[in-house]
Image (tube, grey):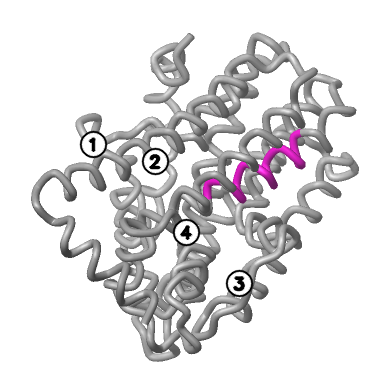
Amino acid sequence: MDLVKDFERFIKPVLECCEGVVEAYPPLLRDRGLEYMRKLNLLRDSERRSGFSYLMPFWFMESFGISEEECHTMAVGNVFALLYFMTQDDIYDSSLDDNKLELLPVSNLFYIEFVGQYRKLFSSDSSFWCYFDRYIREWAESIAWEHSHTKGQAHCYSDEDFIRLSRKAAPLKIPYAAVCLLSWNISCIDSFAAMMDYDQAGFQMIDDWRDWKKDIGEKNYTYLLVEAMKYNKLSSPMELDESHVKKAVYVGNVLEEVIGKASSFFEKARKAITNIDAPYMHLYLDAEMDICRSIISKVQEEKQSMLGGGLSSLLLRLSQNQSE
């Protein structure tokens, strides 16, 4: 089984459909729309990536007995959902005089198409729309919570906080609800919702590692940065700089602890759907566990390389600074 290669034949029609929709926008909005499709590498064949949003429905096609047409419709809707929430994030992060505010009209066109695709599958009185509303509310609450908890200030994180933060990705639960309703596997909806909470909590920690330099610059105090502050015994987040994070990672074991916590969330995600016949979803979660192992392995190799390369004295000094 392969998460991408097994479904490559379905990808091109989905992305061509999305491109055709955006091409039909009024000129200024079309250019903005294509700009965002370009950012996601959704245009030329040579650039196109295989993305979770438009692959995911096809992962359930056989095991849940969903038609190719239904999967195509969901995949198109998911692409526009991705574009919509991406532009919303950019608008939320922009200042009032920022030209990103020009994204408002094109963002709304993305939203119309996102909802329009799902309207083809579910009537207005379908319970699907209750789930839709619930997950959009979760997203809104998560975005507001993140801004108050991490921007410009550092707070400790509880397990509940990780779930709150993970729900920035709550709209990804929408296609799972759709898949379950279309296949009459309604009892699986809550299991998939729990899976997504745990999965995105873990993935957030991987993102924190990938983006830690950017987060320092933007004063976005993630779990990784808060743990680095603790390791360095800093009393104020304003004291934190790149050297502190490197010390916490390469002298201490902060990254192992953070990625270990991510792995525990991925394990909870797997357990949430243990009894559901969704082989490609299980394979996806296994791949995320592999990412965690790869990160730890690479950092440990870097530590050994630094020591073997005559930098042990540097690490020793960093360690001594910690105790001063």
Left or right of 51, for residue 44 = left
Q: Which residue is mark 2?
A: 296
Magenta-drawn stretch contains 160? no
Q: Nearer the viewer, mark 2 or mark 4?
A: 2
Of 167 and 307, nearer the camera is 307
Q: Which residues are magenta?
A: 192-203
Quarter of the image holding residue 212?
bottom left
| Labels 1 and 3: the sequence-earlier one | 1
Left or right of 85, for residue 208 = left
What type is the residue that disc 1 sits on? Glu
Residue 152 visible from this viewpoint: yes
Considering the whole magenta stretch, tell me its main secondary structure.
Answer: helix
The numbered mark at residue 86 is 4
At numbered mark 1, what does the secondary structure look like: helix, strand or loop? loop
The numbered mark at residue 47 is 1
Q: Nearer the viewer, mark 1 or mark 3?
A: 3
